[in-house]
Image: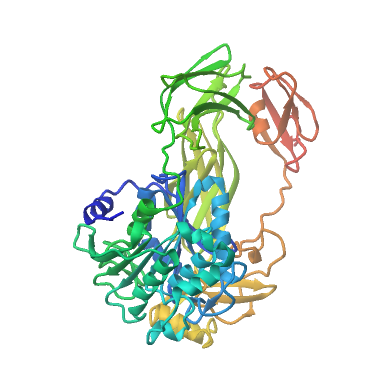
Amino acid sequence: MMLTAAIFAAALLSKPVVAGSWQQNVSVGDFNRVHLYTPDSVSAIGQGRGLLVVLHGCTQSIDAFLTANLTQVAEQYGLVIAVPDAMNKAGFGCWSYWQGTKSRSAGDYKNLITLANNLVADVSYQIDPNQVYIAGLSSGAAFANTTACLAPDVFAGMGISAGPSIGTSSSGAIGPCETANVAARCAQYAGSYASHFDSQIASIAHGRNDTTVNLCYNEQNANGMADVYNVSQLSGENLISDGSGRTADETLWQDGRVSMLWFNNVNHAWSGGQGASGSYINSNSINYAAYLAQYFQENNQRVNRNSPPELSSIHVSQQNSVVTVTGNATDVDGDAITVTADFTDSVGQQQLVSAAPAADGSFSLNSPVLADDWYQLTVSATDSEGLVSTAYTEQLLIGPPPPATAPELSDLAVAVDGQCATVSGRVFDLNRDLDTVTVEFSNGTVSATVNADLFSATQCQLAGGEQSALITATDQGGLFSAELLSFTIDAGQNATLDQHISAGRLDYTNYANCYLEYGTASFVLREQVITGDQCRWQDDDASCFGPAQSCSNVAPDDGDDGGPGDGDSGNPPPPAPTDCVAYTTNNYSHKVAGRAYSTGNIYFPDYFANGSNATMAGSTWGVTTLSSDDGSFWQLGACSQ
């Protein structure tokens, strides 16, 4: 398919609201640091979302991609973005594409395949395994190309920007062009997986003003991948524009299997489009991530382009503890449809009912008799090809409403990253009328993001030293609960490179990396535990670090999950509770909080205190006081004085 300038410009200029957020420095797929962005949207093709793994270049921090206009692309095209920091760096923080064994089970090749497979396996991301792509800049581009050749079964497409050809030496990256038989090498890497090249696609790109990596590699890589796919180049060249004067020149091969771009007015950098910024991020040409997203969407050879069924006119009613769901389910492809209603109670027990709609698409489903409780109703339609409609969801209350009760907070935790703190936990609202969860930090109050019963809020630029965060959950009736968390911020040491060396935090061993990244500007180092009582000073992405030495102000790892050696920035573990605590609330809330359990009649269950097994008066909404000295053995009544 031809990617026209008009279509591309319209795609870039229609910017949906960005509702997602970056999860920074996540440990996943054997990588210690991955920046992840998950959009609210889903892909327009296939099932669920796509995944785009982006690899940094030499000396380039993964933080640079936080300002490279990736979030707009993620939301518009339903792409999860993953930006991993290489674990086995070579040279100036490069992906080591010229070193080591090129194997699916070796080094960062294995880590990238594991990263992609782990994210696909995690149902919370809703990633379509047929829409997994990999891209990169410079050394990251060469490494992405190699990885896509090693695992064409995993990666449906690649985006190679300013990358030396696979199998070339490190000298070839910044010196004369090295001739490489890309097709032969790629086929050799794939081995028994080579049949998956039949449905893989590739975009190859380069900045016209690049004076770092030889321009010859752009055509060598494009022609090489075309030979792998056995497709011929189409005549002519297309001018791609984002509508703001930023352009690129595009050459295509048969069926859109290969695309070659020249970014106009771009040097050795990732082309981020208008407003992009960051180390080795250039804003003079089109947004390459947006181009890739549309190129992949139009030319992906693996997705089932059959349309999923659609639900409409859903109506839900109740009578005598039975719920009736009516509506319409249609499929434009004429496939057979099954409609399913899932009734899940507050403890996660599911009851399913299914039926085929009538010839006109109408359906009616009746639940079994449901016990008094809150239920999550989910209605979906599945066609004979296995495609699933967008689900209809609704909260249902069976039985009398519970008394007005303040929301409850639990599983509270704080994660510290530099001078940023993320507070997270669970919030349970018995009446299902939660209004807000806010977290008050020393430098401002943040409205938490709430997803089901999970919430989180992040604040940065916190001052060093002891800090606290006040979490408040408020319902629509004004009832609230609040908890206070304490934590410590390590502001680090801010100095120039020479000053850090003079202070003994750095030495000349890693001087080049530090100088290339910061030059003569001031930057922050923090002391991190390596092992036992050994520490080192390093910057936030660990690209600039000093020698191992005795820890100065960070306690050694004590081997448990709360010590500084476990990655909590030096905060000591909280002391074990020794004082008695007591809670007065309804029996159902005690059960949800783990202080009680229930048995007996499903309509009028009996409740018992965990540990003592003491009988609690009343049924679901009976109010009881429970107390405990250790958080596990609960008994009736308040704490003894």
In this orientation, which residue lies closer to the viewer: 364 or 384? 384
Question: Residue 176's x, y, as percent?
Answer: 37, 87
Q: Is residue 599 above or below residue 111?
A: above
Work out whether residue 336 can be spotted: yes
Would residue 255 appear left or right of 409 to someone viewing this image? left
Work out whether residue 69 can be spotted: no
Question: Residue 483's x, y, as percent?
Answer: 56, 43
**Which quadrant, please, contains the N terminus?**
bottom left
Would residue 53 appear left or right of 561 to someone viewing this image? left
Q: Is residue 25 above or below residue 510?
A: above
Colour basis? rainbow
Would residue 618 appear left or right of 354 to someone viewing this image? right
Q: Is residue 378 above or below residue 57?
A: above
Image quadrant assignment for residue 40? top left
Q: Residue at x 55, y 45 (%)?
A: 123
Q: Residue at x 72, y 26 (%)?
A: 598
Q: Residue at x 44, y 86 (%)?
A: 171
In this orientation, which residue lies closer to the viewer: 368 or 506? 368
Question: Residue 222's x, y, as percent?
Answer: 37, 70
Q: Residue at x 70, y 73 (%)?
A: 532
In this orientation, which residue lies closer to the viewer: 465 or 220? 220
Q: How many tags in the picture?
A: 0
Q: Is residue 194 above or below residue 459?
A: below
**Which quadrant, please, contains the C terminus?**
top right
In this orientation, which residue lies closer to the viewer: 38 or 175? 175
Question: Residue 404's x, y, as percent?
Answer: 54, 24
